[in-house]
Amino acid sequence: MKPEERRRMIVRAVLPLVVEHGAAVTTAQMAQAAGIGEGTIFRVFEDKDELLEACLLEALRPDAALEQIAEISLDQPLAARLAEAAGALSAHLERMGALHASGHKRQLKQLHRAGRGASLVAMREGMAKLFTPEEDRLRLPAEQLGALFLSLLFTRARDDAASPDTKALVDVFLHGAVTGR
């Protein structure tokens, strides 16, 4: 396996442990999760901190969520497309939240600032594509609607009982807060 492939494999295997345990995860646990010897970690990464930083960078990347969004069938109703996209993005946001809680706040902020702009652009573009089948009926351009939907999704409190679930969020976004009565 090439060094860069090995790095990616280790990071993907270790990331769930970092999300769960933060910096308290041991290199022995990391090696076991990756199915490698502990010494291999130090041949690929300078030290545990470098591996932790690689995991943090990976967690901040929205690539997996964007891939899921790109695979959403445009043949299904818009509400279903948005609910599916919200699920993918919510999982990404929850992973980031878990990492924030793991004690890496300063490091995450620095890393997040570096790639935040490109990530947001990619997420807005992915969301905009979900609106394209209804372009002739939209009140605003698809790009703006994608940005608005992301804003709602990002500000939703996940652990607050008063915060709407995904279905309610999509319904209010598409149909407004007031009924037709």
Image (cartoon, grey):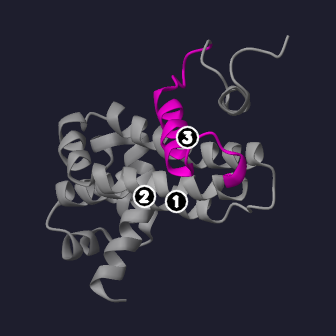
Q: Which residue is mark 2?
A: 122
C-alpha span from label 2 to label 1? 8 Å
Q: Is residue 17 magenta?
A: no
Q: Closer to the camera, 68 or 131?
A: 131
Q: Earlier in the sequence, mark 3 or mark 1?
A: 1
Graded by Cα atoms within 10 Å as few (under 14), some (14 to 19) or many (20 or more), the crowding at tag 1 reads many
Which marked residue is nearer to the observer: mark 3 or mark 1?
1
- Residue 82 locus on image (x, y percent): 67, 45
Relative to 111, say whether 28 is above or below. below
Q: Calculate the distance from the C-alpha at mark 2 to the C-alpha at mark 3.
A: 16 Å
Residue that numbered label 1 is attached to: 66
Q: Is residue 87 above or below residue 51?
A: above
Amino acid carrying mark 2 in the image: Ala
Identity, as a three-letter code, of the amino acid under mark 1: Leu
Q: Residue at x 51, y 36 (%)?
A: 148
Under circle 2, the secondary element is helix
For the residue pair 159 and 73, the one nearer the viewer reads as 73
Image vertical order of residue 41 relative to residue 133, above or below: below
Tell me, yes or no, if residue 29 can be seen here.
no
Give the residue drawn at x 65%, y 52%.
131
Q: Nearer the viewer, residue 161 or 146?
A: 146
Image position, residue 145 (x, y; %)? 55, 42
From the viewer's side, name the closer residue of 137 and 63: 137
Tell me where the magenta segment starts and ends, as one range.
135-161
Residue type at the position of mark 3: Ser
**Residue 8: where, in percent of width, then height?**
36, 72
Distance of mark 3 from mark 1, alpha carbons?
A: 12 Å
Q: Which mark is residue 90?
A: 3
